[in-house]
Amino acid sequence: MPRTKNKAILFLLSVLPFWISAQEKSFFKAPDGRSIVSADLHIHTTFSDGSVWPNIRVEEALKEGLDLISITDHLEYQPHRADLPNPNRNRSFDIALGTAINSKLSVIRGAEITRSMPPGHINAVFIEDANKLLFPDDPRAGIEEANRQNGFVFWNHPNWEAQRKDGIARLDPMHVDLIEKKLLHGIEVVNFNTLSEEAIEIALENNLTMVGTSDVHKLTLWDFDIPQGGHRPMTFVLSKNNSPEEIKKSLFEGETVVWFKEMMIGKEKCLKDLIKANLTASSPNYKGDELIGKVVLKNHSANTLHLKYTGPYTFHKDGVIFKIDPYAEKSIDIKTLEIKSNLELPFELLNGIIGLKKYLNFKIITD
Ligand SMILES: [Zn+2]
Ligand SMILES: [Zn+2]
C-alpha cells in the first residue's frame, strides 16, 4: 500500500522538524544566574480517566522537550476500575518514573483530589504517598495530608464551566480559609484550552503561584496541534538550579511564567526577567550621514513576541506594533533625529499578561 506509506512519511516529515527543534533549543533562555524548568503538573493516564498508559506520557514529554512532569490521576474518580482495579494510587507515577529513568525528564509524584465545589479539584505534587491522600468523604482531609507531606497544592481549573456556570473563577469561603492557613499554594490560570484572567487576579491578590497545565487525557499530539507547531500549556519555573528541591522552593515562592498558545502569563517581575533574557537589541547603526538608526532585535525564545513600541520616536519602515517570530530577528529603522550610540527602547508586550487586562511594559537597552 504505497499510498498509505507515502502519507505516513509525509506526516512524519511534518512532525519531525518541530520535535527536533524543541529538543535541541530551549523554549526560553533563563534569566542570568538562574535555571528555567519547563513543567506540566497536571496529566492523566488510564489509572484514572485518561486514555494512555503512563509510559506514553513520559515519551510525549521527552519528544516535546519538557524538563519535568507530574502524573496526577484522580484519586477518587476511577472510571476504568472494572478493567484496572488500581488499588495502589502511586502506580501510575511508579511506571512513569521507570520509563523516565536515565532520561533528561524528571517525574514527580502527584495526585488530583477530586471534589465538588467547594473546593473543586485540587492537585498535590511533590508528595510522598498518594494513597494517604484518599479520603472520599472529607473535602479537606486530603489537602491537609498533602500539606503534611510537604506537597505543593494548587486549585485546578477554578473557571471550569461544570463547576462555575459563568466561567468566572471566584473564591468560596473554604478557599479563603485554605489560603489563610497556607494549605493552598497555587492556582491554575490556564487549564487545557482555557485561560482565566480572574484566576490571575486571585493569584495576585492572595499571593498564590500561577500554574498552567495541559490536564491532558488523550494524546498531546492531538489536543494541542503539535504537528502544526502548537504546544501544550506549560509552567516555566524560574529556579536557582535544576534540583527538585530548588524547583519546589521556587514553586512555593511563585516564581513562574505560564505559556499558553502565544500568551505568556505571570507576575510582573517574573515575566519581565524572562522577557529581558529573551529579547536583545543591537546598538543603532547609521548609514552615511543619515539620522535613521537601524536596530536589530533578536527573539531568543520559541514564542512569537507581539510588541508595541511606546517611546517617543517613529519608525521609518514599520508601525509601532509588530511581531518577532520564534528564534528570529527583526530590523527596525528608528528616526532618532541625531546620532545615538545606544538607545533605551520601551515596549509593551501585547501577549504578556500580568493581570486582568494588564500587559507587561519593559525597556531594553541596546548593546
Ligand atoms: Zn480536574
Ligand atoms: Zn485533571
Image (cartoon, rainbow, N blue to C red):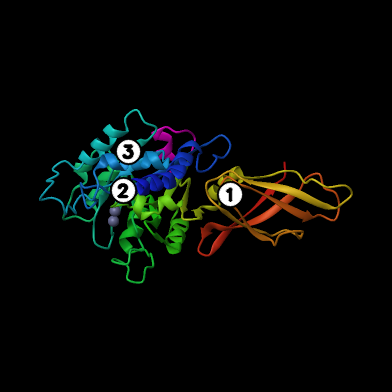
State left or right for residue 94 relative to residue 209: left
Q: Earlier in the sequence, mark 1 or mark 2?
A: 2
The disc placed on residue 108 is: 3
In the picture, residue 191 is in which quadrant? bottom left
Identify the amino acid type marked 3.
Ile
State left or right for residue 44 relative to residue 12: left
Q: Assess disc 2: are there few (<14), some (14-19) or many (≥20) residues with their C-alpha within 10 Å of its C-alpha.
A: many
Q: Residue at x 89, y 49 (%)?
A: 289
The disc placed on residue 272 is: 1
**Furthest residue toward front:** 2
SS at circle 2: strand
Magenta-colored span? 239-252
Q: Where 157 falls versus 31 (above or below)?
A: below
Taking the image in four quarters, ligand 1 sits in the one at bottom left
Q: Earlier in the sequence, mark 1 or mark 3?
A: 3
Q: Residue at x 23, y 42 (%)?
A: 130
Q: Position of residue 163 (x, y in %)?
A: 29, 66
